Amino acid sequence: FDTDANLVQKQRFYSAGAAIAFTAGIVAKKLGLIDFDIDRIWDWAVKYFSELRETVQANKPDPLANLGAFLNEHNRNLLVVDDANDKRTGLTKAPLKLPYGPLMTRYEPDTGLVWIAVDKLREWCAQKQIGFNDIVKALKALDPNTVMKKKGMAKGTELESPQINALCFRAAKANLQFN
């Protein structure tokens, strides 16, 4: 079946499922339990899994699209605030946008930096079965200055919480615009 459907090791689950189904079908037919045309089903399955294999290859995951999906899904968890104090008064500038839920992402218009809470992004990636490291690699390819480091995500708000591990990158390099 693998040869007929051009399946490779990556499609081992399709291969195993087909092996089980056809083995059961052949045995059941020999025992007189079913009267199916196994050859016709084989031909259909070969065509189906060949097309499925091509579809899966065409839809390879795009790490930056995954990052976009994370940001879209957690848009309400975004803080937009300048990093620096007002130069005239020395006072902290008011946030331009406060999060409506847990703070996951911070954007600083004055520095152009985006900060994402590493634990939240990792958790989301695990839930979606997406490679966290693939996202980091893609960001580093766009911006070599992409780093993971400690950041006070709530800096500039009423709550100056302790620093957490955050992924930091330039919004412009990742083609992100915050309005």
Image (tube, rainbow, N blue to C red):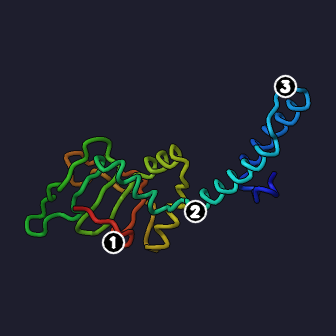
- C-alpha span from label 1 to label 3: 65 Å
Earlier-in-chain disc, 3 versus 2: 3
- C-alpha span from label 3 to label 2: 40 Å
Residue type marked 2:
Ala
Earlier-in-chain disc, 2 versus 1: 2
Q: Vertical placement of 83 versus 24: above or below?
A: below
**x, y (%) of residue 146?**
44, 68
Q: Vertical placement of 170 versus 160: above or below?
A: below
The residue at the point 64 percent across, 53 percent down is 52
The residue at the point 85 percent across, 30 percent down is 28
Answer left or right for 20 relative to 100. right
Q: Are marks 2 and 1 in contact (CB under 8 Å)?
A: no
Residue beneath disc 1 = 172
155 and 142: which is toward the camera: 142
The label number, if any, that marks residue 33 in the structure image: 3
- C-alpha span from label 2 to label 1: 28 Å
The image quadrant that residue 82 belongs to is bottom left
